[in-house]
Amino acid sequence: MSFPQINLVQASSVHWVKKWILGARPRTLPAAVVPVLVGAAICNGSGGAHWGRAVLALIVSLLLQIGVNYANDYSDGVRGTDEVRVGPMRLVASGLASPQSVKAAAFMAFGAAAGIGLVLALMTSLWVVPVGLAALLAGWFYTGGKNPYGYIGLGEVFVFVFFGLVATVGTTYVVLERIPAMSWLQGVAVGCLACALLVVNNLRDIPTDQVVGKRTLAVRLGDARTRHLYLVLMVVGILCGVVATFSNSWSFILLLCFIPAMKPMNLVRRGVKGKGLIAVLAATGQVQIVFGLLSLFAFVLGR
């Protein structure tokens, strides 16, 4: 008689874990992994590299991304802006988790990121502390607080700066304790691709965001211009990576990124809307991953 009860408990535990994994929005995590991968790849062949710090930087980046996702879930949920959604499930809006528990999860992720970031600062320079604090505050106030900047069209600025420049350049710095010019260029490339991910997400949500008064950049630009912006970000991002051929001839292989990029770019150009853009979101994340892996390959072979 006890076996069914055990099975129910096990099923409940699996459901609990699954909902929090889905709430962390795994499809967005390439935006956290790729800049660290690229920033570390730039360090290959340089003397005095501290590779263990790259692992810590990766954990910080992932925790920050997860924290931002939970914070957005909480803030949008309590405002009611997620009540009508085309995209993936949200914990608060769906009623799968209480606002307090999602807020606590966000703060736990941010706190863990801050703790590991402090360790990195003590290993390198205390200048890492204000940069990390800025990232945490930007992550929370993206949709949190009385005047979230994500609601007035500045979300792409946050993504470009913190999941492009800061994550890429910061990784290079903690590994080498200096910043080569190449790190800035690759940070721009990674930032453009990360922004493309957000742009297509907001493109999908234009109809529902307009209803709730969420003035994202996509809402401000409108459907057609947002699609053009997505295409520009994808092309510029990949080409910035290719420009690295001036110092590393192997970076030419980053042109291969256009192969997986053709599918989402064509779908956006053809005017796919609604749920059709979920596939574009996933494919854009795949392009990011391919870009990161090819960058690693190029910098390993090019040194």
Image (spheres, rainbow, N blue to C red):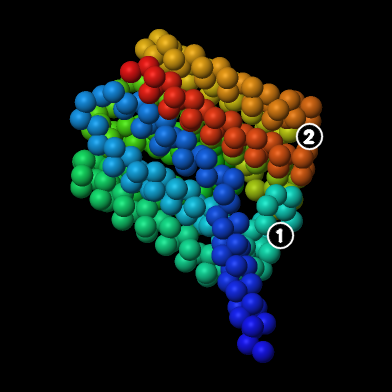
Q: Is residue 298 above or below residue 12?
A: above
Residue nearer the viewer, 18 or 184: 18
Q: Amino acid at mark 2?
A: Val
SS of the residue under disc 2: loop
Farthest residue, direction bottom: 1
**Residue count near mark 1 (Cα–Cα under 10 Å), binned few <14, some 14–19, many ≥20:** some
Q: Is residue 169 above or below residue 113?
A: above
Quadrant of residue 92 in the image?
bottom right
Q: Is residue 220 above or below residue 56?
A: above
Q: Residue at x 33, y 40 (%)?
A: 54
Horizontal placement of 42 versus 158: left or right?
A: left
SS of the residue under disc 1: loop
User: Which numbered disc covers residue 272?
Assistant: 2
Cα–Cα span, label 1 and label 2: 23 Å
- Residues at badges 1 and 2 in contact (C-beta under 8 Å)? no
Q: Position of residue 199 (x, y in %)?
A: 62, 36
Quadrant of residue 155 in the image?
top right
Horizontal placement of 2 versus 244: left or right?
A: right
Q: Quadrant of the C terminus?
A: top left
N-terminal of the pair, mark 1 or mark 2, is 1
Q: Residue at x 71, y 60 (%)?
A: 83
Marks 1, 2: nearer the viewer: 2
Q: Residue at x 57, y 19 (%)?
A: 256
Residue 173 visible to the viewer: yes
Residue nearer the viewer, 12 or 70: 12
Residue nearer the viewer, 228 or 219: 228
Q: Which residue is mark 1?
A: 83
Q: Amino acid at mark 1?
A: Glu
Residue nearer the viewer, 93 or 286: 286
Number of numbered discs visible in the structure rendering: 2
Q: Is residue 104 above or below residue 181?
A: below
Q: Residue at x 67, y 57 (%)?
A: 89
